[in-house]
Amino acid sequence: MTLRAAALACIAILPLLPWRHAVAQTDFSGSVALQSDYRYRGQSLGDGQPVPQLTLNLDHASGWYAGLFASGAAMGDLRGYKLQAYGGYALRLRSGWSVEAGCSRSSYTQLHFVDFNECYAGASAERVTTRLYYSPRYFGHHARTLYGEVNLFYPLHPSVNLIAHAGLLHTLSGMAWPGVPAGSRHDYKLGASVPLGNWTIQLAREQTQDDGIRYNHYPPRPARAWVLSSTYSF
């Protein structure tokens, strides 16, 4: 089974459950957001401009889940949208940790040759999440990659939360391309978020070790930036 077929199988599993029983045990959630820049694994996909984002999630009591993420995105001076569909299975352990596995498909409306698939596995607790991703053709190129990340969440105060992220992208084989390092590339994020009811305001410093995704003669994007975001969750 190909990664694309696996991703579609994960996303399609919920409709195969007995309809009424599945609906009764399925939770729907989502969010809408506006970010001052869309940074993906440390690199800018927003061209330093504000971008809208939408996230929709379906979670079944059995542990299966599926979702869709949409965001404004830029490739060089080509503007459009990034659409990411994902699905998987999560299992809560007696220790309080949860483990999960799933697949995703990322598609770019303005440049479809950079579309790509990934599969992932991870573990999470109340204040920490970890994931390891594998892609056989990262950003549509002939490059097999692994990406590992750790995300931390810590309440500094009832109205202020510390957020931190560290990630490492490693190319297993293939040539270096725009967005694909010849060896490894790390990225970091450190910031704070303020919950205001269903709203969350977040300010974070994000950076990576190189100057970002670029195509042909398009200028490089900054390797580091402050990113302000406002999110409404429902």
Image: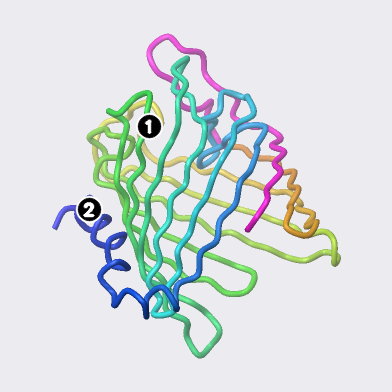
Task: Name the image colouring.
Answer: rainbow
Q: Is residue 107 above or below residue 153?
A: above
Residue 42 placement, left or right of 201: left
Q: Residue furthest left?
A: 1
Under mark 1, the amino acid is: Tyr
Residue at (75%, 58%) from the top-left corner?
162
SS at circle 2: helix
Q: Residue at x 60, y 52 (%)?
A: 31
Viewer-nearest residue: 138 or 4: 4
| Residue pointed to by mark 1 | 108
Q: Label 2, on which residue?
A: 3
The C terminus: image quadrant: bottom right
Disc 1 to disc 2: CB gap under 8 Å: no
User: Given this view, does label 1 or label 2 mark the residue nearer the observer?
Assistant: 1
Where residue 218 sits: x, y (%)? 46, 12
Name the residue located 76 percent from the left edge and 48 percent from the top edge.
201
Magenta stretch encompasses residue 164: no
Nearer the observer, 19 or 169: 19
Q: In the image, residue 180 lies at what x, y percent? A: 37, 34
| Residue at the extreme bottom of the image, as rendered | 94
Between residues 145 and 71, which one lies in front from this camera angle? 71
For marks 1 and 2, the one nearer the N-term is 2
**Quarter where residue 67 is shown:** bottom left
Q: Does the magenta segment cover residue 211?
A: yes
Relative height, residue 92 to residue 212 (above, below):
below
**Taking 78 as reference, is 118 left or right?**
left
Q: Where is residue 188 drawn, in percent x and y?
A: 60, 46
Q: Position of residue 108 (x, y in %)?
A: 37, 32
Provide the residue span drawn in magenta: 208-234
Q: How many marks?
A: 2
Q: Tag 1, which secondary structure?
A: strand
